[in-house]
Image (cartoon, coloured by chain):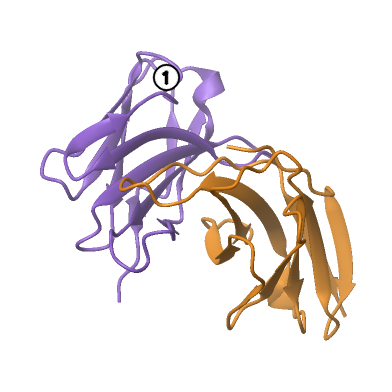
Chain colours: A purple, B orange
């Protein structure tokens, strides 16, 4: 079946621009996570949704970062007034509440470059 | 979640077993050991997880020491497609809600001909 998809795959933004990154989780998956991965580092948690509820946003680095999942399926990560330090790969993952609960399925990521 | 320590890199000849170690000396009783891998330009992929018993699936085997302070991921017959960064992650078990994964820097496994 279809996996987690993310769009765009690559995004170049000028410093100060706003960007929106989209995540389409696996159909029916209740949980959705966003991670940020800097070059040469492991992914770092940003935020977590259970259905449409954002239950944990402790990893968002600043108030310029905002995530939503209004209908409990597609999610958007928005970064306002982008800075060079925002350059990274942004990964989305989803998981179900069934027998595969422990497994998070990751998308391919969006590579954001801020110039 | 407990902290994990992994070697930064390892090499393995194709067809041989790859044994990737992980130390997690501060693991607590309700924490599981997970392994994910990340092939270049892809998102991480779940491999296996375990609590205290050894586990095996179609991808790999997980050996956890009796004191649970360390574990080893075994790829029995490594292929070039197994070249990736392998992450060992310790995380509390199912509590009714999903929980984040805390990645370290992992082990970069290079499989060679």
Which residue is at 50% across, 25% downward?
Answer: A86
Residue A26 position within the rendered picture, expressed as x and y whole percent measured from the top left: 28, 62
Residue found at the far left of this picture: A71
SS state under label 1: loop
- From where the camera sits, is residue A68 visible? no
Which residue is at 68% across, 37% downward?
Answer: B3
Residue A80 position within the rendered picture, expressed as x and y whole percent measured from the top left: 33, 18
The answer to whether residue B103 is left or right of residue A54 is right
Image vertical order of residue B17 relative to residue B96, above or below: below
Residue B62 position within the rendered picture, expressed as x and y whole percent measured from the top left: 68, 69
Q: Quadrant of the N terminus of chain A?
A: bottom left
In the picture of the structure, the residue carrying the numbered disc 1 is A82
Count neighbours of disc 1 (C-alpha within 10 A) and say few if under 14, some if 14 to 19, many if 20 or more.
Answer: many
Nearer the observer, B7 or A3 = B7
Residue B68 position within the rendered picture, expressed as x and y whole percent measured from the top left: 72, 54
Image vertical order of residue A21 relative to residue B18, above or below: above
């Amino acid at each position: 079946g279809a996996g987690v998809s993310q769009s765009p795959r690559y995004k170049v933004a000028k410093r100060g621009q706003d960007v929106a990154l989209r995540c389409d989780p696996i159909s029916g998956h209740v949980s959705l996570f966003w991670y940020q991965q800097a070059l040469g580092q492991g992914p770092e948690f940003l935020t977590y949704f259970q259905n449409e509820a954002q239950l944990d946003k402790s990893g968002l680095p600043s108030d310029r970062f905002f995530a939503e999942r209004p209908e409990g399926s597609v999610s958007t990560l928005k970064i306002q007034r982008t800075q060079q330090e925002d350059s990274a790969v942004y990964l989305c993952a989803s998981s179900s509440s069934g027998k595969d609960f422990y497994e998070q399925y990751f998308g391919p990521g969006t590579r954001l470059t801020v110039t | 979640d407990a902290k994990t320590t992994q070697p930064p890199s390892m090499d393995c000849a194709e067809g041989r077993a790859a044994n990737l170690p992980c130390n997690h000396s501060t693991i607590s009783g309700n924490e599981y050991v997970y392994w994910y891998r990340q092939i270049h330009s892809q998102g991480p992929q779940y491999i296996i997880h375990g609590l205290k018993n050894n586990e095996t699936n179609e991808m790999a085997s997980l050996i956890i020491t009796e004191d649970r302070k360390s574990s080893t991921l075994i790829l029995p017959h490594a292929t070039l497609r197994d070249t990736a960064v392998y992450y060992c992650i310790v995380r509390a078990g199912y509590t009714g809600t999903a929980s984040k994964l805390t990645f370290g820097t992992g082990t970069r496994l290079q499989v060679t001909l």
